[in-house]
């Protein structure tokens, strides 16, 4: 009897941990240290050439190789300050306050911000 209660308690704890991780993974981005980061902790950037509210990203092809977009699934419905824009290939990219969000290829670990003010047109999203 005690073993079955232990197994039940472990199963509950494991299930609760999985739900907590799933809930955290559902958040598309969050503020960390005053900067917007993706769920994986990597810094997010906006591009001055993207027009807020246009529903499009102008960073495609080779540009997207250096500045990978933060993609959003077809079934996902961002809310609040988040929305989705359509890329040239038809894929959906997450946007914050109407501006598409990107990673920077040279950022190697969570917290890196090496793309901030790159060519005066790429910027981290600040609080």
Image (cartoon, rainbow, N blue to C red):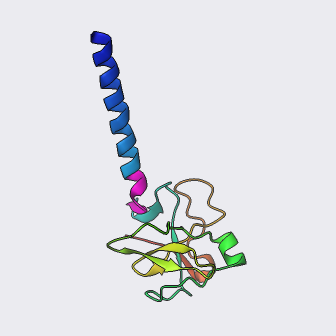
Q: Where does residue 80 sit, x and y in percent of width and height?
A: 32, 73
Of 56 and 65, nearer the camera is 56
Name the foreground residue: 118 vs 71: 71
Eyeballing the image, is 18 above or below 63?
A: above
Q: Residue at x 47, y 80 (%)?
A: 99
- Write down the region rendered in magenta: 24-31
x and y, in percent, of residue 17 in the image: 37, 38
Q: Residue furthest right?
A: 62
**Tally of numbered discs:** 0
Can you tell which quarter of the image residue 120 is in? bottom right
Q: Is residue 6 magenta?
A: no
Q: Position of residue 55 (x, y in %)?
A: 48, 85
Which quarter of the picture shows residue 97?
bottom left
Image quadrant of residue 60?
A: bottom right
Indicate the position of residue 107 as horizontal and vertical percent values.
Answer: 62, 60
Viewed as shown, does residue 59 lie left or right of 77?
Answer: right
Compared across the picture, whether 64 is left or right of 47 comes to right
For the C terminus, the quadrant is bottom left
- Residue 28 among magenta residues: yes
Name the residue located 51 percent from the left edge and 67 percent from the top edge: 44
Depicted 19 relative to depicted 103: above or below: above
Residue at 63% from the left image edge and 71% from the top image edge: 67
Q: Quadrant of the N terminus?
A: top left
Depth check, front residue: 81 or 113:
81
Vertical side of 58 occupied by 17: above or below: above
């Amino acid at each position: 009897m005690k073993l079955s209660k232990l197994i039940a308690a472990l199963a509950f704890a494991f299930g609760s941990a999985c739900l907590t991780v799933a809930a955290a993974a559902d958040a598309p981005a969050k503020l960390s240290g005053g900067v917007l980061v993706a769920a994986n902790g990597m810094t997010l950037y906006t591009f001055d050439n993207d027009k807020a509210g246009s529903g499009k990203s102008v960073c495609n092809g080779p540009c997207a190789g250096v500045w990978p977009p933060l993609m959003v699934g077809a079934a996902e419905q961002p809310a609040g300050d988040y929305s989705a824009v359509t890329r040239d290939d038809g894929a959906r990219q997450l946007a914050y306050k109407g501006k598409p969000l990107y990673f920077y290829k040279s950022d190697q670990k969570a917290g890196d911000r090496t793309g901030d003010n790159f060519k005066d047109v790429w910027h981290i999203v600040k609080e």
